[in-house]
Image (spheres, rainbow, N blue to C red):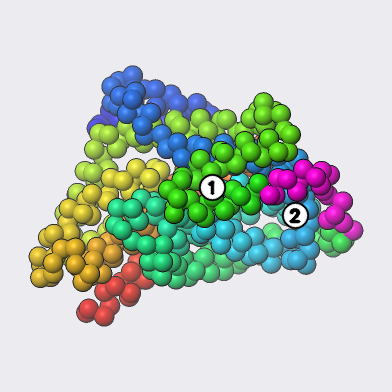
Amino acid sequence: MIPSLAIFVVCYFFIATEKIDKTITALIGASLMIAFNLISYEDALAKVDLNVIYLLIGMMVIVNILASTGVFEWIAIVVARKAGGNGIRLMLLLCIVTAVLSAFLDNVTTIILIAPVTILITQLLNIPTVPLLIVEAIASNIGGTATLIGDPPNILIGSQSHLTFNDFILHLGPIAIIVLAFTLLIQTKRFGREFMVSEKAKKRLTDAYPAEAIIHPDRLTRALIVLGLVFAGFFAGPLLHIETGIVALGGAMLMALVCRINIHEGLAKVEWNTILFFIGLFMLVGGLEENGLFELLGEKLVGMTNGNLVLTCLAVLWFSAICSACVDNIPLVIATIPIIKSVLPEFADDMNLVLGSAAANASIAEPLYWSLALGACLGGNGTLIGASANVVVAQIAERNNYRLTFMDFPRQGFPMMLLSAALATVYVYLRYFFARV
């Protein structure tokens, strides 16, 4: 455990300071984990979430094909006009749209679709780009918290706890809305002056004609039909047991076919450094998981609460939030779910409830699972590598010559993470325990 932790800490330092390219750092760290037999090559490969990788590749190809039609320029002009050239109104509109889409698609897909539009709008109105991209990433993680399919941790929790799509909306939807409202209020106060739009920029907006932005209307028509099929696949995927990554990758190939796009050129535009960074990061964190670090931390955490259910729920929430800010939340949730299951019999005996009964589930299991979901999803806003959407938005920014560093993200994200975890703490206590006092 100690050697794997040492490798991770060193890699984390270089990723955070950006003294070495983070893709190189992640892959060297993964190689060292395997070279020192801290995780076998086969197990390291198994830790790579191919659903995320396929989703990224597929959506990058789709977005690049759509971008070639001029549709993002069209959307940018229309959205900016709807906001009346008001920077703050624009931020609120984009963030609300991002949060809603993230709830019903997933936050990575949403960011890949929204970020290019955002960059074009900020260029059009001459307002800061990077702060707005960070706020959108934060909004996407908050929106993804609200539903079963919005964030991978929720999918894992739902499959292990047998909680339904409606359960997630009813229990996590209200707090997601509250957290989003507080986040946007704070960001409005913080960036009020920076998002002021000059009269010259407003005039440039009124002089722009959205229809002129579309340069390949026939290609756009075909691409939008395929995109509609992809979205339908995202919604129907859980019912048909088809992963979103397969839908995205298949949809990308279909779009390239019907739009007559050279697939070699399409794949050449994929951000392969982002893909390789994720692969290295999955292996790196997998080494920690394989050596029992998450399980040890979880057991220590639950042991510290001395059998108090309220304290255990809040400890799970804050533990998962802090850890999710530092490492990928998928292995964290995978390691924490068995810990929650192991303590359920003890709490059921103390409360004289039958384990697995409706009363036991509502009183014990569900508050623990909701606490884990809130911590794991909202905690991703703490740092750049806390959530996949954060990494993707940084890579999109870099590709468009905007520098979003490791330290830029926590300046906005970490305070929001602490605030959201505090709001979630109050919510969990009031909703599940206040009436019992």
* 45 displayed left or right of 395: left
Q: Residue at x 63, y 65 (%)?
A: 92
Query: In the rendered structure, does residue 214 fall within the stretch colored magenta?
Result: yes
Identify the residue under disc 2: 76
Identify the residue under disc 1: 108
Can you say which quadrant of the picture contains the N terminus? top left
- Secondary structure character of the magenta stretch overall: helix
Q: Real-space Cα distance between discs 2 and 1? A: 20 Å
The amino acid on which the numbered mark 2 sits, given as a three-letter code, is Ala
Q: Which residues, given as a range, are shown in magenta?
A: 207-225
Residue 310 visible in the snapshot: no
Classify 10 Å Cα crowding around label 1: few (below 14), some (14-19), many (20 and above): many
Can you say which quadrant of the picture contains the C terminus? bottom left
Q: Position of residue 87 (x, y in %)?
A: 71, 62
Q: Residue furthest top?
A: 35
Classify 10 Å Cα crowding around label 2: few (below 14), some (14-19), many (20 and above): many
* 350 displayed left or right of 218: left
Q: Position of residue 432 (x, y in %)?
A: 29, 73
Answer whether labels 2 and 1 touch (C-beta < 8 Å): no
Disc 1 is placed on an element classified as helix
Dot placed on the residue nearer the N-terminal end, 2 or 1: 2
Q: Residue at x 69, y 63 (%)?
A: 90
